[in-house]
Amino acid sequence: MKNRFLKLSCLSALGLLSACRTTIDNLTPARLPQNSSHIYTMTMAVHVPSREVIPQSLRPFIVIDGKRQPMKRSELGDRIFVCDYRFSPQRDRAHYYYELEYDVCSGREVVTKTERSQLYEFQISNRCLLSLDACRGISGTKVVVLGRGFRRDDRVVFDDRLAETRVFNDHMMEFIVPPVEADRNYRLTLQGSGGSLDLGDFFVDPAPIYASPETLRLSGFERQSLAFRVDHPVPSSGLYLNVTTDIPEDIVMPEVSIPGGQCSAETQISGMGYRAQGSLFVTAPGYQLLLIPVNVEGRAKEAAVAPEATVLESFPGETAPQASSIELSPHGDEDVIVIE
């Protein structure tokens, strides 16, 4: 208990000491967009809690390129100071720090003190974001980005997922919302040889998938066309549709993918000759679940047991044929009948 009390006392004392110290805060962003005048405003704020400090004696400076430049009071407040510094057009960064001189009354004497900030880095960027066409949407949506300093190799990234990006010029580009998990926010960044640029947040809503027909009715081994469609063209890599069913032994359908740049795909589905009722479940990243009811008309499964082989009656001089079995090849273009 005693050690705990001592520890709390020390922390309180440190807090009081820091509150009584004169501090310098840097208000200049680490990165500023390039401007045609090449003049940039450096800003700092000071905190002088001591009553012995003469307020009118505050003399702030910025030290940059080895030069000590005086700063002036800002209109934002009495303890905020600014300096407009001109950079050469070829420069894109600089290191600097602040100094603050002030006078303190010490008895009958006036003592001058100096505080120095840490070293900071300042970067000038010719890349900046002006606006996004939208801040939310569904997979496949095209979003226009306006700004400055775009390059041909720039790409928009959703967290860590690359989006298809097309750069028109150094002021305009567009990207396609990729098929990512829906109902959540993604952090957008622009990445390329010009460096990284934050584009803000983008919320992805679930997109619909449509089917035609909406309900399937199959008769026996009948094959039927089934088409899928989305609202926007899918990325160039295509969109795989994960199709599952609760009656896997009663229907046959190949895998389905919508080709890149397209909005639809068509496939064939067939029954296996038995009576069944169930559903298809269609999912894809960024899309809503699609449920398609399926009804197959055919033989009851109980009657599907093969009967005992019977010898067929033959004509005189002919050999009676053997009992035959029929197999369906569900994956070929046509049903193949194998007679054994």
Image (tube, rainbow, N blue to C red):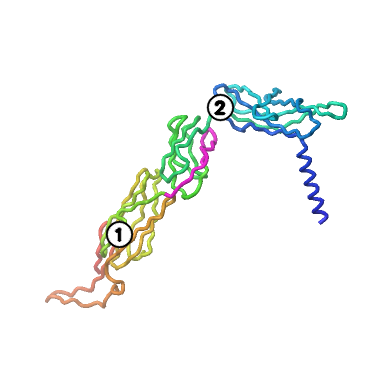
Along the viewing direction, whichever of 178 and 291 lies nearer the viewer: 291
Q: Residue furthest right?
A: 108
Q: Which residues are magenta?
A: 188-206
Q: Secondary structure at mark 2?
A: loop
| Depicted 64 relative to depicted 192: above or below | above
Left or right of 65: which side holds 11? right
Q: Secondary structure at mark 1?
A: strand
Q: Which residue is mark 2?
A: 34
Q: Measured from the top left, where is residue 134 in percent x and y?
A: 45, 39
Residue 249 position by quadrant: bottom left
Residue drawn at x 20%, y 77% is 311
| Depicted 4 relative to depicted 101: above or below | below
Give the residue type that dot 1 points to: Leu
Give the quadrant of the N terminus.
bottom right
Q: Residues within 10 Å of mark 2 (few under 14, many from 20)?
A: some
| Depicted 270 relative to depicted 8: above or below | below
Residue drawn at x 43%, y 46% is 138
Q: Measured from the top left, where is residue 270 in percent x and y?
A: 29, 60
Left or right of 319: which side holds 226? right
Lower sequence index among marks 2 and 1: 2
Asked if marks 2 and 1 touch (Cβ < 8 Å), the reply is: no
Q: Residues within 10 Å of mark 1 (few under 14, many from 20)?
A: some
Residue 216 is marked as 1
How far apart in space, not on screen, are marks 2 and 1 (Cα)? 61 Å
**Secondary structure mainly formed by the magenta segment:** strand
Residue drawn at x 81%, y 52% is 5
Residue drawn at x 46%, y 46% is 204
Residue 47 is marked as none
Q: Is residue 198 one of those drawn in magenta?
A: yes
Along the viewing direction, whichever of 210 and 179 lies nearer the viewer: 210
| Depicted 331 relative to depicted 168: above or below | below
Give the residue type that dot 2 points to: Gln
